[in-house]
Image: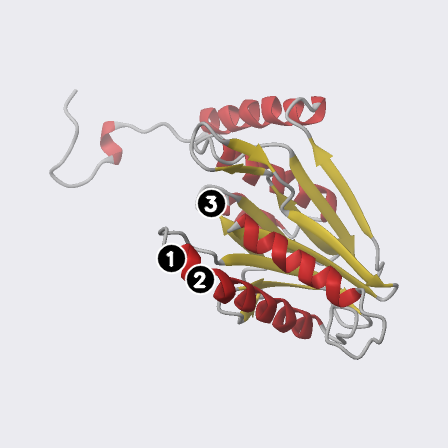
Amino acid sequence: MTYCLAVRLREGLVFLSDTLTNAGIDSISTYRKLHAIRPSLDLVFVLESARNLETTHEILDRIQGDLAQPDGDNESLGTVGHLFEAALYVGRLSRQVSQRHREALSSVGADGAATLILGGQAGTGAPEILLVYPEGNFIRASGDRPFLQIGETKYGKFMLDLAVTAHVGLRDATKIALGSMMSTTRPNLSVGPPYDVAIYRDDSLSLEEFRFDADSPLLANLEVLWEKHMLNAVAELPHVSREDFTGSNIPQA
């Protein structure tokens, strides 16, 4: 399984992904799922992937192959003028790759689909994050819910809702994103470090990239403090007494 997320904020964008992949409990590996692509000085993209790893690798190879074409007449991430055009291009590649291998994969009960998050900035357009489906279409993050998740999404959603509600900056959003990741890692052994982070500041056309390994002192400190403050928050919640229950199903002393 996988967990990747992207958050759109007033100051810019935050991306975070785990790196674990598994083909059963005896076959666990780490592969990068967050990929930075810089076709030119005025184009910067981050691509995150979930589901089929082989399809993702072929999509990335096709992207790099198209960028390497010398004539510049072919479609590529270097020829787009808007982020939605980049999403449509990546969606077409994804659909082509999965369709090419569908018959062989279906014969062994496998699924070659990949789900992707594409974000970044193209020229003077606004920074965005988009979810690209295996069918090739996409959706944008909304104003009410300016974050996207793929993979094992259910455990970490609350933390991202918190970041949106609090209107936090990039630094605090990165900490909250790591909290979302830790909330996912605890109940799910197939999601885990190293964690890859990319931070994009509006109109900078440059990325800050970090990796947190499993033995990272900062990550360990975050986990300790996170658990401590969560327990403190529980202690501050109102006491639940018998009088708080309503109806006939009242617990007996």
- Answer yes or no: is residue 4 visible: yes
- What colouring style does the render use? secondary structure
Q: List the residue tagged with mark 1.
A: 106
User: What separation in Å lies between label 1 and label 2 (alpha carbons)?
Assistant: 6 Å
Q: Secondary structure at mark 3?
A: loop
222 and 144: which is toward the camera: 222
- At a point 85% along the width and 58% down the height, the residue shown is 204
Q: Secondary structure at mark 1?
A: helix
Q: List the residue tagged with mark 2.
A: 102
Of discs 2 and 3, which sits in the foreground? 2
Q: Is residue 182 above or below residue 146?
A: above
Q: Which mark is residue 152?
A: 3
- At a point 58% along the width and 68% down the height, the residue shown is 91
| Left or right: 121 in relation to 190 | right
Q: Which mark is residue 134?
A: none
- Answer yes or no: is residue 164 visible: no
197 and 229: which is toward the camera: 197
User: What separation in Å lies between label 2 and label 3 (alpha carbons)?
Assistant: 24 Å
| Left or right: 164 in relation to 35 | left
**Which residue, as the protein is rendered here, is positioned at the far bottom?**
73
Task: Indicate the quadrant containing the C terminus: top left, top right, bottom left or bottom right.
Answer: top left
253 and 18: which is toward the camera: 18
Q: Secondary structure at mark 2?
A: helix
Crowding at dot 1, Cα within 10 Å, few <14 / some 14-19 / many 20+, comes out as few
| Badge 2 amino acid | Arg
Rendered location of residue 180, percent (x, y) = 55, 40
| Badge 1 amino acid | Ser
